[in-house]
Image (spheres, rainbow, N blue to C red):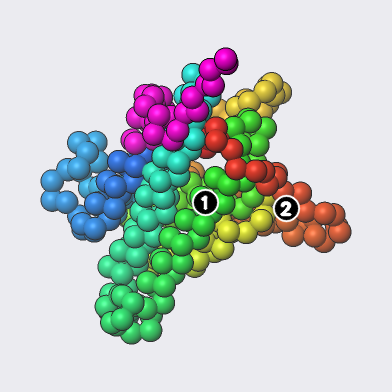
Amino acid sequence: MTRRKKRRGPAEQLKRVAVLPALATLMNAVCGFAAIHFAARGMNDPKALWLAKPSLTYFAAAAYMIFLAMIADALDGQVARLSGSTTGFGAQLDSMADMVSFGVAPAFLMLRVVESSLHDILGPVGPAFGGAGGKLLWLIAVAYVCCAAMRLARFNIESNADISSHMGFSGLPSPAAAGLIASLVLLCRDLLPELQEDVPREWVVATSEAIVYLLPVATAATALLMVSRIPYPHAINHLIRGKRPFHYVARLVLIALFLVWKPQLTLAIGFLWFACSGVVGWLWRRRRGGAEITQTPPAEPQEEAMK
């Protein structure tokens, strides 16, 4: 008589977890939580947060935490692929961490920056109290959080573990949306104060105010792009995978030098270009009458799906 093999249940599947990818994913969530903490403080620290940046504000620190979360998010996927430890648990954990770092943290940071800068105009910000401006700002932040949650849930359903399905995205990726918001905050709260010694103060103040007004618009736009079907490439995979001509590597080195020289400005230009490139390409294809190609085709849910 043949003995039937016992089928593993969900509880037994979770007895073993890939350590390094899970730690990188949890670091992503920790950085997102730190970003929320710094954004909640929302004021200049009389003591240095970092010894190299004694004038660093809490808002700028929150934006930097979001970028650290992006680095951790990129590392966990690479580590999982290299170690061959892609699991359904890792995919779910990654989405939960992304929701904190790229869903809640950017929306809360935008809300606090705009509220602190335009408090006299907006008044109290909330769903039930305050003027129309404060309620609208709160609704934009809530819409961003909801769109990020739907974006991550859709990605989990439509993606699979094959690397070819991670060469592109349907809709703006949530890290790119969060990066655009965080980079605008860095421009306003970290770069512009440093330029006051070199450029007229009136120019700095006017630019800072313009960025503050732009933040809610950028947040609403990225929220819509996340739930859209506009195709976007996987930036990291397209940049570093495969063999490229020499001049391509030279351009990457030049970008890296600009990133070291003026990281705030380089990040803002890069994320703004990435977000707009998908829209421009989609409009161009529609104008030419070509069929829109989604780079991440829908697939059946997989047990071994990963980020």
Residue placed furthest toward the right: 289
Residue placed furthest toward the front: 1
Which residue type does callout 2 highlight? Answer: Gly
Task: Establish if 211 lies above or below 161.
Answer: below
**Residue range (magenta):** 1-27
Give the secondary structure at mark 1: helix
So how many labels did they put on this image? 2
Which residue type does callout 1 highlight? Answer: Ala
Residue placed furthest toward the left: 46
Q: In which quarter of the image is the N terminus?
A: top right
Residue that label 1 marks:
153
Which mark, by number, is residue 58?
none
Residue at image point 52% right, 51% down: 153
Position in image of residue 163 (x %, y %):
63, 30
Task: Establish if 113 lies above or below 37.
Answer: below
Query: Mark 1 or mark 2, which is nearer to you?
Result: 1
Position in image of residue 23 (x %, y %):
35, 29
251 left or right, relative to 95: right
Residue at image point 34% right, 36% down: 26
Determine the image quadrant of residue 204: bottom left
Which mark, by number, is residue 281?
2
Return the residue nearer the eye: 112 or 153: 153
Residue at image point 54% right, 21% down: 4
296 left or right, relative to 133: right
